[in-house]
Image: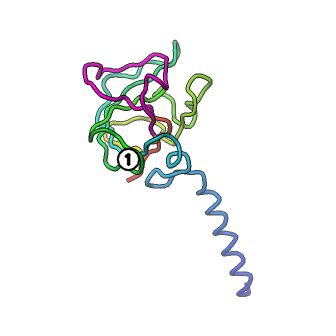
Amino acid sequence: MSEPNRAFAFVLVLNGVLAISCGQAGEAGVDHEVTSLGSAEVTARLLEIPGEFPPNDLYDYAYVLKYRVEKVHRGKVLGEKILVAHYNPLKPRSSVQDEFSGLVGGNLKKFRTGDVHRMALEMPLDLLWMGGIFDKYFSQRGIRYWAIWTNLVKK
């Protein structure tokens, strides 16, 4: 293969790799949506899932989870530990959005304690979601954030 043909082949392969990687969240959970949606963007570790998620067969709901903020990328969140409501947490974020949820999504497939998520957040929850809420932290005062976009941060 001649030098110009090798260079052309390299550029084609490079463009293919870039095309495949665009639209997918990187290792740090960064994509266009997480960096532009909501009033705040954080990287946070999921500290606990208080109980089992109910099935989605009867109604749609939001479930409040506790996180420890590792980094605030933009906006403000109040405190090192925050409470975040996720819409229908049994569903992968890529397919969770429906006619009731408003804009929600991400690449997270399953919630697991200890995982790190990059999230676009909005607040307050009671102005963003009017449906059922499972909040086992109801005795704890403070803001409940609404997760608009949730990506897994890969280690």
Q: Which residue is drawn at the image coordinates 72% and 77% (left, top)?
A: 8
**Could you say which quadrant of the image residue 133 lies in?**
top left
Q: Is residue 35 magenta?
A: no
Q: Which residue is drawn at the image coordinates 55% and 30% (left, top)?
A: 96
Q: Residue 36, relative to residue 121: is it above or below?
A: below
Q: Position of residue 142 (x, y in %)?
A: 30, 28
Q: Position of residue 77 (x, y in %)?
A: 35, 40
- Quick one: 4 or 48, which is closer to the camera? 48
Colouring method of the image: rainbow
Q: Is residue 123 magenta?
A: yes
Q: Which residue is drawn at the image coordinates 30% and 25% (left, top)?
A: 50
- Quick one: 99 or 129, which is closer to the camera? 129
Q: Residue 39, relative to residue 89: is it above or below?
A: below
Q: How many marks?
A: 1
- Quick one: 149 or 95, which is closer to the camera? 149
The quarter in which the N terminus is drawn is bottom right
SS state under label 1: strand
**What kind of residue is marked 1?**
Thr
Q: Which residue is outermost to the top?
A: 58
- Quick one: 124 or 100, which is closer to the camera? 124
**Pointer 1: what residue?**
43
Disc 1 packing (10 Å; few <14; some 14–19; many ≥20): many
Q: Which residues are magenta?
A: 121-146
Q: Which residue is drawn at the image coordinates 35% and 44% (left, top)?
A: 44
> Is residue 138 found left or right of 94 in the rendered image?
left
Q: Which residue is outermost to the bottom?
A: 3
Q: Residue 118, relative to residue 52: is it above or below?
A: below
Q: Residue 83, relative to residue 152: is it above or below?
A: above
Q: Position of residue 136 (x, y in %)?
A: 31, 20
Q: Position of residue 42 (x, y in %)?
A: 39, 45
